[in-house]
Amino acid sequence: MKKIAVLAIVVLMTACQQNKIGFVDNVELMDKYQEKLDVEAKFKAKAETLAKKRDSISQAFQIELQAFQTKAQRMAQSKAQEEYGVLQQRGQFMGQQLQQEEQQIQLEGQTEMDSVISRVRSRIKEYGKANQYTYILTGGDGGGVLYGADAQDLTAEIIKLLNEDYKK
């Protein structure tokens, strides 16, 4: 009988405890998190620099190709074909190098962004534990919350916390 009474008390206490639940709008969070914005700006600048480099190399190569075409008219056909082949190979090589640079920038950007997301998740987990949340759900596009009361929206608090941490 005592076991049943103890079990009933435990069940009653568990039923009386409310879960503390909040949610974070991921889209808003990532749009306003300064570290994420800085990472995006950094890699956008790298991509723009590479695009300028590609444009200048392409322009120089086009000028060289036009000069060759003029010069080729006065050359023997076999010699012109040979030089054109060398020129074409060089153009392909430069294109491959630029493509490799672009892929490297994309990989670095994705790796750094993955690190940012990992730190955000970790910080939200710490926040949840420190503030005794049972659950913190994701909201916004693609999130798991179709509706959440404004009182449970932790987005602004988390953004403020993350940006303060990032400034340090």
Image (tube, rainbow, N blue to C red):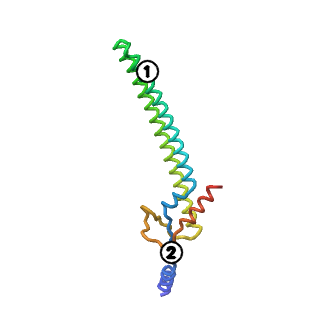
In this picture, is 95 found above or below 14?
above
How crowded pointer 2 is (Cα within 10 Å; few <14, some 14-19, many 20+) is rated as few
Looking at the rendering, in which quadrant would you find the C terminus? bottom right
The location of residue 156, given as percent across then percent down, is 56, 65
Instruction: Report helix, strand or loop for mark 1.
Output: helix
Q: Residue at x 50, y 74 (%)?
A: 19
State the mark number for residue 26: none
In the image, what residue type sits under mark 1? Ala
**Residue at the extreme right:** 168
**Residue at the extreme left:** 77
55 and 103: which one is in front? 55
The location of residue 134, given as percent across then percent down, is 51, 70
Residue 165 image-quadrant placement: bottom right
In this picture, is 55 found above or below 27?
above
Q: Residue at x 34, y 14 (%)?
A: 77
State the mark number for residue 67: 1
Residue 76 image-quadrant placement: top left
Q: Residue at x 59, y 67 (%)?
A: 130
Determine the CA span between mark 2 and mark 1.
76 Å
Q: Is residue 80 left or right of residue 9?
A: left
The location of residue 145, given as percent across then percent down, is 44, 68
In the image, what residue type sits under mark 2? Asn
Q: Which residue is mark 2?
A: 19
Count how many numbered circles sit on residues in the image.
Answer: 2
**Residue at the extreme bottom:** 1
13 and 28: which one is in front? 28
